[in-house]
Amino acid sequence: MQKSSLGFSLIELLIVVTIILILAAISLPNWLKARMAANQASAVQSLRTISSAEITYSATYSQGFASSLTQLGPPASGPPTSAAAGMIDDVLASGIKSGYSFNYTPGATVNGVTPTYSITASPMTPGTSGQNFYYSDSTNVIRQNLIQTASSTDSPIGG
């Protein structure tokens, strides 16, 4: 009886599968950390984008800041207006982007003008989609908190 030399033995396949599983176990935590860091960087950049859009909105429409993120978003059709200024994309205008949830709060209206705003960015799943909580307002300073929702009293990023 002659043995065929084609293919792999069961032992060889088990060794290959074991090596792949070991490599996956080593690299998975690093991949999760990299994804979390990317989400955090995206949240900070989104806050910068919103701040820039708010400055442009205020200068363009002369009514202070927007009363919601959707006001900064793109119009459904036609040219931009103060109700849909087209200054941020529709994903960011929805309030959820890259594992973070954005909560926009306009200031009290004075004579038909919104003089201030604040916005927080919180990870949707803390410890998985992101670790840090962020805050920004009409001062355009981005602040962070490592434990809970950030506020105006937290330390600025890099400070």
Image (spheres, helix red, strand yellow):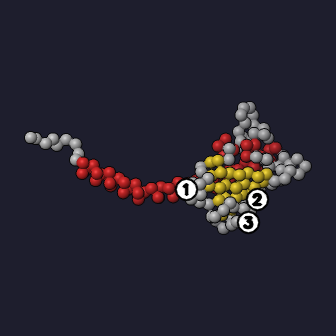
Q: Position of residue 26 (x, y in %)?
A: 41, 59
Q: Amino acid at mark 2?
A: Thr
Crowdedness of circle 1 by 10 Å Cα count: few (<14), some, many (20+)? some
Report the residue marked by disc 1: 128
Q: Position of residue 83 (x, y in %)?
A: 78, 40
Report the residue marked by disc 3: 153
Q: Amino acid at mark 1?
A: Thr
Q: Comparing marks 3 and 2, which lies closer to the viewer?
A: 3
Secondary structure under tag 2 reads: loop
Q: Comparing marks 1 and 3, which lies closer to the viewer?
A: 1
Q: Amino acid at mark 3?
A: Thr
Q: Position of residue 116 (x, y in %)?
A: 80, 54
Q: In the rendered image, which quarter contains the N terminus? A: top left
Q: In the rendered image, which quarter contains the C terminus? A: bottom right
Q: CA distance from mark 1 to mark 3?
A: 25 Å
Residue drawn at the location 88% of the way across and 47% of the way down:
112
Question: In this picture, is 111 found above or below 143?
Answer: above
**Sequence-wise first label, 1 or 2:** 1
Residue drawn at the location 73% of the way across and 46% of the way down:
69
Q: CA distance from mark 3 to mark 2?
A: 13 Å
Instruction: Confirm whether residue 42 shows in the render.
Output: no
Q: CA distance from mark 1 to mark 2?
A: 30 Å
Q: Quadrant of residue 153?
A: bottom right
Secondary structure under tag 3 reads: loop
Residue drawn at the location 67% of the way across and 59% of the way down:
134
Report the residue marked by disc 2: 139
